[in-house]
Amino acid sequence: GENVEQHPSTLSVQEGDSAVIKCTYSDSASNYFPWYKQELGKRPQLIIDIRSNVGEKKDQRIAVTLNKTAKHFSLHITETQPEDSAVYFCAASTSGGSNYKLTFGKGTLLTVNP
Amino acid sequence: DTAVSQTPKYLVTQMGNDKSIKCEQNLGHDTMYWYKQDSKKFLKIMFSYNNKELIINETVPNRFSPKSPDKAHLNLHINSLELGDSAVYFCASSPGQGFRAQHFGDGTRLSIL
């Protein structure tokens, strides 16, 4: 089955700096890679996703890059703000079929210091 | 309107008891899921249903029994609760399988005394 490794487990940055979270996956058939943000005591919420036919996707201060050859993908947050503080999860899945499921990384606790 | 709603939000009970968690989604999605998030925040899928049909059962003890009366509802019944069942249980839904963002409920925090 799929295995997703996520690094670092904790990340502390100063407000205004950039933050980068990296994930690797094991199943070369995986082709959908979402990122979720979970604030303390809240539910995970999708912030951005990318499909395998795209190498990069950007949404305002958030961007995701994908390297299918190396089987890794990364989340980039620029101009970080205190409200970006949360746990971020990467995930990977194959599309369709009866085995479709998301496999999550173990999460990164991002702290943005004002 | 809450898109994916779970009840109860908190559940405190004794070891050995049986309890149920209910989930409803009003997004018109075909697929629903149950996840367990342990104290280390690891999110792990337990079950997935597509149009009321069980499609994923991830090596979960048979004390856990999901039930989907229709595609908008997915309930989770747990028999003979154990200390290790303490966790936050999230329900989620997506519009079918593959390339689909999953929408999570607010979670049910289960504490076993």
Image (cartoon, rainbow, N blue to C red):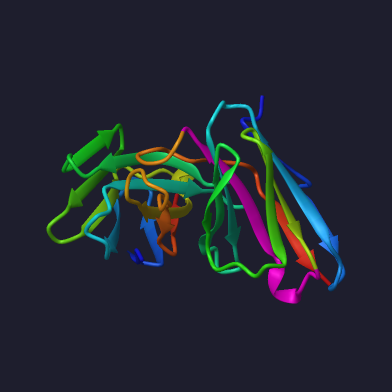
Image coords of residue B18 (percent x, y): 84, 63
Lateral position of residue A80 relative to residue B53, left or right: left
For residue A54, above or below residue A15: above
Task: Determine the residue positioned at 44% across, 45% down.
Answer: A84
Quadrant of the rendered image containing residue A47: top left
Please state, as top left, top right, bottom left or bottom right, where the N terminus of chain A lies in the image. Answer: bottom left
- What's the magenta region? B80-95
Image coords of residue B46 (percent x, y): 57, 59
Image coords of residue A33 (percent x, y): 32, 48
For residue A6, above or below residue B74: below
Residue closer to the observer: B30 or A57:
B30
Whether residue B81 is in magenta: the answer is: yes
Image coords of residue B31 (percent x, y): 52, 39
Task: Determine the residue positioned at 81% across, 70% down.
Answer: B80
Whether residue A99 is in magenta: the answer is: no
Lateral position of residue A4 relative to residue B13, left or right: left
Q: Looking at the image, can residue B106 be seen?
A: yes
Lateral position of residue B112 relative to residue A35, left or right: right
Task: Determine the residue positioned at 53% across, 34% down.
Answer: B30
Task: Determine the residue positioned at 31% across, 37% down.
Answer: A61
How many marks on residues? 0
For residue B70, above or below residue B46: above
Quadrant of the rendered image containing residue A70: bottom left
Q: Looking at the image, can residue B5 be seen?
A: no
Residue closer to the observer: A15 or B60:
B60
